[in-house]
């Protein structure tokens, strides 16, 4: 069993996770920063702010695979330069942009968002051994949860003290600093024994984007949709109870328990299949709708929180294991895009369920989305053959036995 201390002792791992946490906290807060600017500075509606956030999210979803493919072909520092400079320009000019131009610029900024999350996952896959990877991805998921706890909360707090334009500058500065920090660190994106394999050529997409990878991406979409839906259902439940100001406390409990769950899961001696973790997450989410005030809701979300980071980490781990090294950037970018799509779809689907029934229907809809994604992932994984190597698979032959052992332990990704 690999300990977290062993993972953090890997050269470059601690600064990578630290810089990633800074940048990801800013990136998770960018939607809130734009919302505060449109509503408070431009004095426009939340619908107008939502359109700007939707444009940013659409850009991120479309840009993920494109930037990942560019990393595979041109290298990390080239892509970071191509994204850091546009982010600097965008966030500096946000306070002076008219709304219509801001709408288009937000899409462009999303398209060229610094790929911190996908780069961190690629680097973890390259810097760790098979035995270390699960604990490393658990730490990465914990960092992600911390960024969701800290980032938006800091933006809201600062917006109450300074102007929304200054907050936008701060968010942009953190994103730029994170991208520049990773460029200076320049972590390896391929292991030493994968570098030679890259010379054999880039495998065709159908060689790695098979049923097992589609299963993993489906489950990544499902868990993102579930988590977004849970956030909305929490707010709706407390609004009906007249306790909406306590929503931040419930979300904080959810985030802290997710951190605990990620740390516990990373220390376990054996992994669990992704479909099982996601299915359990969906099951424990549904009864959270029985809580009708904030203390009971804090208790109700503990189960879902404990399973969140483990589920996210197994998805990331499976993507890295099922992908040849020379296309890992495109695969991790596709994973990020799928997650963005899940977050974007979660709010309207759960919102319709809440409007058509009661706030408890939101938890039910979110949980059922997770269960459906787990079922689809399980069926796709079971019906597809185990991955095999090809001459152009960038050293995948070397990992075939390792992948097979992983799959035999898990049963499926």
Image (cartoon, grey):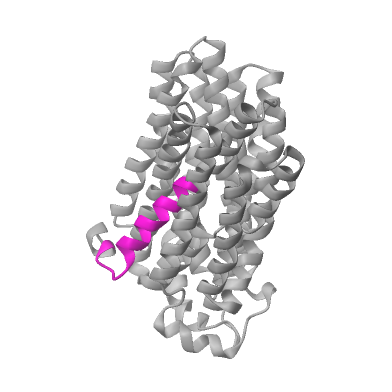
Residue at 51%, 87% in the rendered image: 197
Find residue 110 and report its horizontal and vertical position in percent. 64, 52
Nearest to the observer: residue 277 or residue 165? 165
Reply above or below: 227 against 142.
above
- Residue 272 is at least partly visible in this image: no
Residue 232, quarter of picture: top right
Looking at the rendered image, the quarter that the N terminus falls into is bottom left
Find residue 281 and report its horizontal and vertical position in percent. 48, 39
Label the magenta part by its dominant secondary structure.
helix
Find residue 115 and report its horizontal and vertical position in percent. 54, 60
Reply above or below: 131 against 168.
below
Residue at 47%, 17% in the rendered image: 245
Nearest to the observer: residue 7 or residue 387? 7
Residue at 41%, 69% in the rendered image: 184
For the magenta stretch, what is the residue range? Answer: 8-26
- Residue 14 is at least partly visible in this image: yes
Reply above or below: 143 against 38.
below
Nearest to the observer: residue 369 or residue 121? 121
């Amino acid at each position: 069993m690999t300990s977290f201390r062993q993972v953090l002792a890997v050269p470059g791992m601690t600064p990578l996770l630290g810089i990633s946490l800074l940048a990801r906290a800013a990136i998770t807060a960018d939607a809130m920063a734009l919302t505060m600017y449109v509503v408070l500075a431009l004095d426009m509606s939340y619908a107008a702010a939502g359109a700007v956030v939707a444009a940013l999210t659409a850009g991120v979803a479309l840009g993920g695979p494109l930037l990942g493919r560019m990393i595979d072909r041109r290298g990390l520092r080239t892509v970071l330069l191509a994204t850091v400079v546009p982010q600097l320009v965008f966030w500096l000019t946000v306070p002076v942009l008219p709304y219509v131009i801001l709408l288009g610029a937000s899409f462009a900024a999303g398209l060229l968002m610094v790929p911190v999350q996908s780069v961190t996952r690629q680097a973890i896959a390259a810097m760790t051994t098979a035995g270390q990877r699960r604990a490393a991805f658990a730490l990465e998921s914990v960092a992600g949860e911390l960024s969701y706890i800290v980032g938006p909360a800091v933006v809201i707090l600062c917006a109450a003290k300074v102007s929304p334009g200054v907050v936008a500058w701060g968010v942009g500065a953190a994103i730029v600093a994170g991208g520049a920090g990773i460029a200076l660190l320049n972590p390896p994106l391929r292991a030493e024994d994968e570098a030679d394999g890259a010379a054999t050529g880039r495998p065709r997409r159908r060689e790695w984007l098979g049923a097992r990878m589609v299963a993993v991406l489906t489950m990544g979409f499902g868990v993102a949709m579930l988590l977004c839906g849970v956030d909305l259902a929490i707010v709706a439940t407390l609004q009906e109870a007249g306790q909406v100001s306590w929503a931040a406390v419930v979300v904080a409990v959810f985030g802290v328990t997710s951190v605990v769950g990620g740390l516990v899961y990373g220390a376990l001696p054996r992994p669990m299949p992704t479909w099982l973790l996601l299915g359990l997450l969906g099951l424990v989410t549904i009864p959270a709708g029985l809580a009708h005030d904030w203390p009971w809701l804090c208790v109700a979300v503990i189960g879902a929180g404990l399973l969140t980071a483990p589920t996210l980490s197994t998805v990331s781990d499976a993507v890295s294991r099922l992908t040849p090294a020379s296309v890992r950037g495109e695969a991790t970018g596709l994973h990020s895009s799928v997650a963005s799509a899940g977050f974007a779809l979660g709010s309207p689907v759960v919102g319709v369920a809440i409007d058509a029934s009661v706030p408890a229907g939101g938890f039910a809809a979110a949980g059922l989305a997770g269960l459906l994604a787990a079922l689809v992932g399980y069926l796709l994984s079971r019906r597809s053959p185990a991955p095999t190597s090809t001459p152009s698979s960038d050293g995948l032959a070397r990992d075939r036995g390792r992948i097979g052992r992983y799959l035999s332990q898990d049963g499926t990704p």
